[in-house]
Image (cartoon, rainbow, N blue to C red):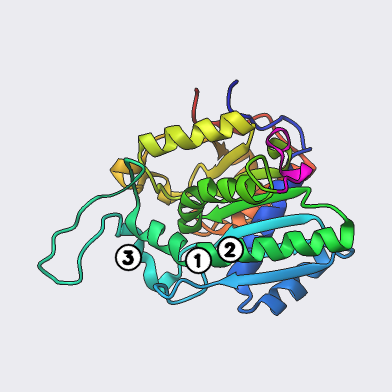
Amino acid sequence: MPLVTLDTGTSQWPTIKSAALVLWRASLDPSPSTLCANLQPYFPTASLHATEFHTAINMSRRAVLVSQDTHVTIAFEGSDGRELIKNLWSMGKGPNFWDLPYPVFEGGNRVHSFFRDMWHAMRGDVFGALDEAVRRMRECAGSGPERVVVTGFSQGGGVSTLAFTDILQYIRCTYGANAPDPQSWAADGNLGHVLQHITFAALGAADQGYHAVLNGLYERYSIRAWDFMNHEDKTRHVHDLAFRSWRGHRYILPDAVVRHCDGAFGSDGHLILGYLKAAEWMEENATDQVKSEYSY
């Protein structure tokens, strides 16, 4: 079965827009309460809850989990401008200046060392917040999530690549087929309807072997795994050479879309507000010119 592709038309763009919206507001709002207050006008009937995640190895918050009724968004934020150099820390290194850098592997596949450390530093807290969101949904709505979107922008997109396999496994082992008390929403046959991986200008975080495993999971569970990239985004060609293999589908936003965004992408073509404006335009208008860069 091939990887799930983006439909033509407007039907899937509201979810894409919602992911970009949470990322954009998270980039502006310093606290969970402020984030919820500023998201509320976009979801006027929803009961919103937000949790933030820190790593202790970054200068600022690196992710948030937002739940709205029966929808969950786990959003990994873009780089803090004070820490851009850390995107280059793809190899591990000891504490001494004479220690030589070394590649880092998980399951025999090479991964971005610092992105992995970021995810591992907040993984337990993310799982705890997901558990709390599911508990709240079951109490209030009598059922689990209808949608869980793992999303990220730029650096956060790279971190989400390493996080997604763990999140999928956690859901299956805690609520799904491998759980002591399986819940229907997390059954293997439902995961393609519930779980999505949507990123924007994601930085590379793993090698071809890791992506082969990840693509296999996308395919097995019919996961919608899409990265969106402005055709003028200047980060498109700066990924670590070891991490430039294909993952899911990368959809290029052409000039036919970008020109309607009123400069929201910024001078480097790399602002999350631009991706939000593009998703808003596509939700209203759509175009068949948004094509996947990859051909499986």
- Residue topped by disc 3: 85
Residue 290, percent from left and from top: 62, 34
Give the residue drawn at x 34%, y 64%: 86
| SS for dot 3 | helix
Q: Residue furthest top?
A: 1
- Residue topped by disc 1: 122
Q: Residue furthest left?
A: 98
Q: Mark 2 to mark 3: distance in Å?
A: 25 Å
Residue 7, percent from left and from top: 71, 30
* In the displayed structure image, the side of residue 70 where residue 58 appears, left or right: left
Q: Earlier in the sequence, mark 1 or mark 3?
A: 3
Q: Is residue 243 magenta?
A: no
Residue type indicated by callout 3: Ile
- Residue topped by disc 2: 126
Q: Mark 1 to mark 3: distance in Å?
A: 21 Å
Considering only vertical position in the picture, is 272 above or below 184? below
* In the displayed structure image, the side of residue 204 where residue 250 appears, left or right: right
